[in-house]
Image: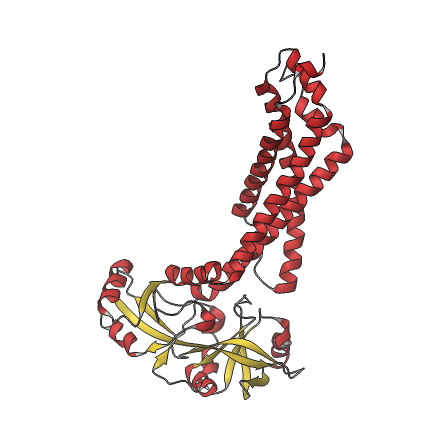
Amino acid sequence: MFRKIPLAWLQVTREKTRLVVALAGITFADLLMFIQMGFEGALYDAAVRPHYSLQADLVLINPQSQTLIAFKTFPRERLYQALSYDGVKSVNSVYMAAGLWQNPETRIDRAILVWGIDPASSAFKSAEVTQNLDHLKLLSQVLFDQAGRPEYGAIAEQFKKTGSVETELNSKVVSVKGLFTNGSSFAADGNVITSDSTFLQLFKRQPDQIDIGLISLNPDADLERVRSQLAAGLPNDVKVLTLEDFAEIEKTYWASGSSIGFIFGLGVGVGFIVGIVIVYQILYSDVSEHLPEYATLKAMGYSDRYLLGVLTQEALFLAVLGYIPGFILSFGLYQLAYAATLLPIAMTLERAVSVLLLTIIMCSVSGAIAMQKLRSADPADVF
């Protein structure tokens, strides 16, 4: 009888208006979870994109450094010491600081992340950077991040037309001589790469104080063994990390060292709770309106287990039907969010499956709560 009569489906589809309201509520809850997870994922992806773009096997940083926007310096001498270890092929250094970029059209200054590198040896894997290293050998010449915020000005468009754009960085005139792609993040709306000499002029930094040390190993070197040797042999004013560990520090900062990670997690939780309340109200109303019918089924011999199974199926039907429009609409919202923020927000299989599972759990919890009302269905209410 259970197989022949799709009681759960008939119950779900009987009241069209109630079904539409339930699906709208679940869709809204799913959209809220998708958006919060999407921004959280974009936050982490954008934050660690510069880390993985560095040309290195191991990285040296100050142990007090937690995020790119507030790095601490350490002595360049540590790099030279690392060069003496077996397996180390070469070393390189990176300066980094936040500067003020002037929009050449509006003359408005805006903070931008500035990277200072040795133009004789690229610190980045990007072919766009490598091909333009010769331009950086001259003072006051920079490479501009064409994926940064538009508030910096139409630098990429002007450069493609004229081959050079002049503006001010930290109140000093600089010329854009090339473009590269990195993108904005919660830490920085854009990036600029200069030579180490230009960087030192812009920020009045001591040359022997660097922000990031890059270590390249021989092809046959054991990465973990070399890392352990460096960690044990170098003074404790530096930390030796793989690129993955380096990126993980940044993720940890945004996840637990700032309020942003908590806010996104709270948003997902709110969406989950909203969905539970909406589905519970729908299922509870259904049970209340049909309590005599459920009591009749009990009188006919159907067990509580069967009736509870029907209610569980109703919850699952609502979960799947509400998830589908939420999943589809999230693609459009992701596109709008990317256009507005330039953050790398996009749908992933892991996120799609996670929200689906959360939706099923959300509706199952609602069904479990509504079951308490169903258990009270007594055949004596009918006779």
Q: Is residue 208 visible?
A: yes
Applied colour scheme? secondary structure
Percent x, y for residue 349?
Answer: 54, 46
Which sits in the foreground, 18 or 119? Answer: 18
Residue drawn at the location 56% of the way across and 77% of the way down: 111
Q: To which quarter of the image does residue 252 belong?
A: bottom left
Percent x, y for residue 246?
Answer: 39, 63
Q: To which quarter of the image does residue 305 belong?
A: top right
Image quarter (top left, top right, bottom left or bottom right) of the C terminus: top right
Percent x, y for residue 301?
Answer: 62, 11
Q: Is residue 321 visible?
A: no
Relative to 114, 21 lies left or right: right
Relative to 141, 378 lies left or right: right
Residue drawn at the location 46% of the way across and 68% of the way down: 126
- Up/down of 381 relative to 65, above or below: above
Q: How many marks?
A: 0
- Up/down of 336 relative to 104, above or below: above
Residue drawn at the location 56% of the way across and 57% of the way down: 263
Percent x, y for residue 79?
Answer: 29, 75
Q: To which quarter of the image does residue 123 belong?
A: bottom left
Image quarter (top left, top right, bottom left or bottom right) of the N terminus: top right
